[in-house]
Image (cartoon, helix red, strand yellow):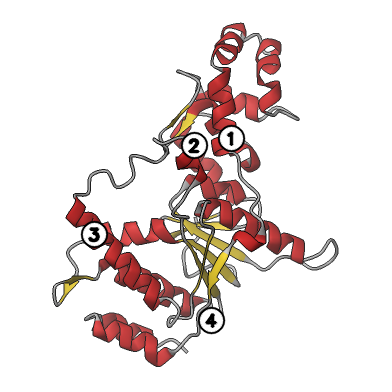
Amino acid sequence: MKSLSNFKPYEVMYVDAMNLSARSYYGMSDLEYHGRKTGMLYGIARLFIAWMKKAPGIEIVMLWEGKDSWRKAKYPIYKANRGESRTPEESRIFWNCVERVKTALPIMGVRQAWSPTYEADDVVANFVAAEIESAGAGAETPRRMLLSSGDWDWWELADYSDILYQHKDVLTREDMCARFEKKFKAPMVPFDRLWLFKVLTGSHDNVSGIPLFPKKLASKLCNLKDIDEGSIIHALVRLGEKKWAERVAQHNWIMNRNVELLRGSEIPLEDIEWIDGEYSKTGFGDILLKNGMETLYDRFMEVR
């Protein structure tokens, strides 16, 4: 794991906006100023100031979730566990904080992007693909990217970028492999097949997998050459796993549903909406002071 004192000169950071907002809000829930909750704004500003100092000139892009997710429309309990513990009043306060953050970000020089019917991990996958394509097929390389999220869905892009996991620890591919193996007690799968691993075993988004499907077996399948969702049953038979081949065939509807829900989606560029930022050091400083963040303001003033 890399420390923030020893990192590559990243040029752009794509941030999982809702993940960072919720983590900051609940992680600093006691922070208030004149009766307003300020933990969300504090956590976001602190992260950005740290990276503005570490990587002057870095472009920061906050990626928000679409409000009309096609996945939720198709599968109503998708992510139904998110925010379910909040009372209506707590929910109102939380979303008020989100709106204040969205208003502050342009002054902080942060760009914002979203697609109304897609999620942030769909958007970031499209942006990473565009970065790679823009570099051309020859000598040039994509901009050095850092992806900031606590969501394992973003790990599917680890072949192209390091991950600022939980918005604090910079993880390389090797770090992520070690964490996967520790978490699932199974060999790491190719990053671009993590979606298939989740199709078989389920995801944390309220999407169940094939009942009781072993994670080690899912890992073994995902590491086979040329495996895809259409060849799972035949591969299981070849591996002598007839029982699991029958189980998958019996629950083929789960496979089909999960492939649709969990496989990445290509988003037409015209479906992505933007709010650009125009950085103002004075304006950023005023935001901090007006929210009672004097210590953070002093740290910010050291930024060139």
Mark 3–mark 2 Cα distance, whole angstroms, equals 26 Å
Question: Which residue in the structure is indicated by mark 2?
Answer: 74
Nearest to N terminus: mark 3 or mark 2: 2
Q: Name the residue rendered at 46%, 36% in the picture.
A: 182
Question: Which residue in the structure is indicated by mark 4?
Answer: 56
Q: What's under tag 1, amino acid-wise? A: Glu
Q: Name the residue rendered at 40%, 70% in the picture.
A: 47
Asked if one can make out residue 110 in the rendered structure from this viewpoint, the answer is: yes
Q: What's under tag 2, amino acid-wise? A: Lys
Above-or-below relation of 284 to 146: below
Nearest to N terminus: mark 1 or mark 4: 4
Q: Secondary structure at mark 3?
A: helix
Q: What's under tag 3, amino acid-wise? A: Arg
Mark 3–mark 4 Cα distance, whole angstroms, equals 36 Å
Mark 2–mark 4 Cα distance, whole angstroms, equals 43 Å
Nearest to N terminus: mark 1 or mark 3: 3
Question: Which residue in the structure is indicated by mark 1?
Answer: 260
Q: Name the residue rendered at 40%, 56% in the picture.
A: 19
* Furthest residue toward left: 35
Horizontal and vertical percent position of residue 174? 58, 47
User: Tags 2 and 1 in contact by the CB under 8 Å rule?
Assistant: yes
Question: Which residue in the structure is indicated by mark 3?
Answer: 92
Q: Is residue 281 left or right of residue 115?
A: left
Nearest to N terminus: mark 3 or mark 4: 4
Horizontal and vertical percent position of residue 181? 51, 35
Q: Secondary structure at mark 2?
A: helix
Nearest to N terminus: mark 2 or mark 4: 4
Q: Name the residue rendered at 76%, 61% in the picture.
A: 133
User: Tags 1 and 3 in contact by the CB under 8 Å rule?
Assistant: no
